[in-house]
Image (cartoon, coloured by chain):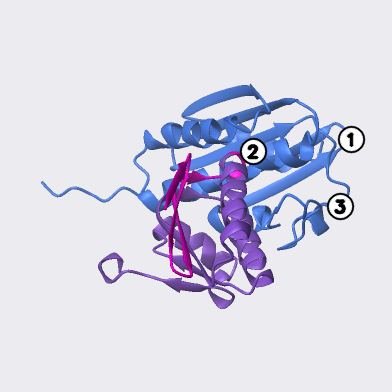
Chain colours: A blue, B purple
């Protein structure tokens, strides 16, 4: 795996809090996943915009696992969310589905393999726009999306 | 005439078909909203298709697919498609996709 960068970073920074979710790829779980992410981030007081950006990015990634990774099958989706002391939120969303043959092509705005079901092809573009970083790795054993967003500092309260 | 299902309420006035969508639009909920709107769209064949988004609290790219799909279906039958009152989160997504260049977006004054 080409996660050397991630590993080195993990060694330096210890997560303040961490949550793992494992659930089947039923489409009804899309709303569960984004709400769970929202509740997890809420503990460090995000702004409303940050919260809705994160919800949307998570919704896109999970929908990709369901619609593309596991297409006509039912599989398992693995999410790990972490919060760091510098108010950074990191989320890893993984499936063991069919994988993406060409990631660069898949990440192009409006690119979709599923026109029939009115997929807009904007999923990765939204993830890129709404988060600070997006990393996609994919192979025969599935696809992993890692996203992070550093939240704005809390306003200082003057007493 | 008034029809209600989960997520969308459809009203018809003269040549206008107004779809008031509520709740979250994601891949899961888009399917039933799409079916309901299309069924009425082909039955009524309006001149104007209004998609009222004021009750939509959350939308992801599946919502873009839903809107673009209704826009092209409306165009097929010669109807104009108009979006109404998207909230801030929905507006942000519409902007990322540049929907405003394709479809008219109307906002109520108090929402500005």
Where disc 2 sits, the SS reads helix
Chain containing mark 2? A
Q: Residue at x 66, y 70 (%)?
A: B77
Q: Earlier in the sequence, mark 3 or mark 2?
A: 2
Where disc 3 sits, the SS reads loop
Q: Earlier in the sequence, mark 1 or mark 3?
A: 3
The foreground one among A82 and A62 is: A62
Quadrant of res A6: top right
Quadrant of res A33: top right
- Horizontal side, residue A129 vs residue A150: left or right: right
Q: Which residue is mark 1?
A: A140
Q: Residue furthest left?
A: A159
Q: Residue at x 39, y 63 (%)?
A: B85
Q: Earlier in the sequence, mark 1 or mark 2?
A: 2
Asked if residue B22 shows in the view, the reply is no
Q: Give the number of the disc on residue A102.
A: 3
Q: Give the number of the disc on residue A62.
A: 2
What's the magenta region?
Answer: B1-28
- Horizontal side, residue A37 vs residue B85: left or right: right
Q: Nearer the viewer, mark 1 or mark 2?
A: 2
The foreground one among A82 and B84 is: B84
Q: Nearer the viewer, mark 3 or mark 2?
A: 2
Residue B21 is a magenta residue: yes
The foreground one among A5 and B52 is: B52
Return the x and y of residue A109 as percentages of the image width and height: 71, 63
Q: Residue at x 58, y 30 (%)?
A: A29
Q: Are marks 1 and 2 on the same chain?
A: yes
- Residue A62 vertical position relative to residue B36 in the rendered view, above or below: above
């Amino acid at each position: 795996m080409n996660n050397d960068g991630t590993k080195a970073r993990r060694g330096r920074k210890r997560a303040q809090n961490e949550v793992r979710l494992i659930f089947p790829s039923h489409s009804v779980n899309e709303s569960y996943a984004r709400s769970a992410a929202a509740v997890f981030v809420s503990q460090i007081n995000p702004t409303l915009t940050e919260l809705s950006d994160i919800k949307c990015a998570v919704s896109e990634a999970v929908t990709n696992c369901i619609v593309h990774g596991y297409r006509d099958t039912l599989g398992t989706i693995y999410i790990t969310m972490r919060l760091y002391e510098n108010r950074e939120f990191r989320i890893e969303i993984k499936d063991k589905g069919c994988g993406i043959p060409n990631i660069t092509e898949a990440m192009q705005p409006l690119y979709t393999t599923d026109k029939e079901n009115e997929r807009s092809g904007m999923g990765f573009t939204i993830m890129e726009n709404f988060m600070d970083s997006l990393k996609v790795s994919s192979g025969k054993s599935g696809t992993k999306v890692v996203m992070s967003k550093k939240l704005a500092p809390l306003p200082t309260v003057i007493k | 005439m008034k029809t209600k299902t989960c997520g969308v309420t459809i009203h018809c006035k003269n040549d206008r078909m107004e779809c008031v969508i509520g709740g979250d639009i994601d891949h899961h909920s888009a399917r039933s909203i799409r079916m309901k709107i299309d069924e009425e769209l082909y039955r009524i064949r309006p001149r104007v298709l209004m998609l009222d988004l004021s009750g939509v609290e959350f939308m992801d790219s599946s919502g873009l697919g839903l809107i673009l799909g209704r826009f092209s279906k409306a165009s097929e039958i010669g109807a104009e498609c108009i979006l109404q009152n998207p909230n801030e989160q929905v507006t942000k997504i519409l902007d990322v996709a540049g929907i405003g260049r394709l479809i008219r977006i109307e906002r109520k004054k108090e929402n500005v």
